[in-house]
Image: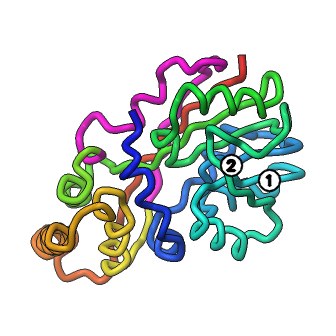
Amino acid sequence: MVDETLARSFEGIGSEYERYRPGFPAGAVELLAPDRVGTILDLGAGTGKFTELLIGRADRVVAVEPSTAMLDVLHAKLPEVTALSGTAERIPLEDGAADAVSVAQAFHWFDREPACAEITRVLAPGGAMALIWNRADPACAWDRSCHRIVHPAVGASDDTTRAAAEELPGFRFVRDEELTWREVISRDDYIGRWTTVSSFLVADEPRRAEMLADVHRVLDEHVDTAGRAELDLPHLTDVYLYRRA
């Protein structure tokens, strides 16, 4: 069951999401579209963090996103992309319009049954769908500690990405890949990133202050981050590839 309060928490942020959230590795696009296709749909596109990697992979890139604030950023950043207001349950495209569909960091917010039906409708027969998530590298103790403070559901050992491998109606599961990459991020931007996650956005001000104080404490005390203005942050990216049945 989708938590609507958490899901809607992103509606008011756009520039903050664009500034602080990480991007994605190019290898994720290679898995979805190793060869150029006609149309790729990026569903739940946000500010275009994954959308921008699709340019050059298709004759037409379409981004669908319900948040006006995020869509405004995407419009300004990627004018060559067809950016449309919509949801996974009501996609503003005609039947069979997409040759491939990407869903980056968003599938867990969808109402699974109607969303799969809609994606199946707009995806051409045999078309590919990739579900993509960035997640914390369990080997990075300080980042995992910060996850447990601000976003404990994702900081747990069993996070939301693992549900993706389940059977999806209308799709055939093909494979999954775990990609590793690293990001150099300033301490200020790392802390700012936590202000864009759903659990922080729905918290009251005293709880937000407590979360940020605890994150500062972790960074001040851990040997890999203490006294450093720039942090070396490892990431894991899970890619789950499907074909329309």
Precedes in sequence: disc 1 or disc 2: 2
x and y percent of residue 148 in the render? 19, 52
Give neighbour class at mark 2: few <14, some 14-19, many 20+ (Cα, 10 Å).
many
| Amino acid tagged 1 | Val
Which of the numbered marks, if any, corresponds to residue 220? Answer: none
Secondary structure of the residue carrying tag 1 is strand
Q: Tell me if 31 is positioned left or right of 153 in this view.
A: right
Determine contact: label 1, label 2, CB under 8 Å.
Answer: yes
The answer to if 192 sits in the magenta stretch is no
Residue at 44%, 65% in the rendered image: 183
Is 40 located above or below residue 72 in the figure?
above
In the rendered image, which quarter contains the C terminus? top right
Looking at the picture, the colour scheme in use is rainbow
Residue at 64%, 65% in the rendered image: 71
Magenta region: 154-182
Is 57 located above or below residue 32 in the figure?
below
| Amino acid tagged 2 | Asp
The residue where tag 1 is placed is: 61
In the rendered image, which quarter contains the N terminus? top left
Q: Tell me if 214 is positioned left or right of 204 in this view.
A: left
Q: Which quadrant of the figure has residue 182?
A: bottom left
Q: Nearer the viewer, residue 19 or 9?
A: 9
The residue where tag 2 is placed is: 42
Secondary structure of the residue carrying tag 2 is strand
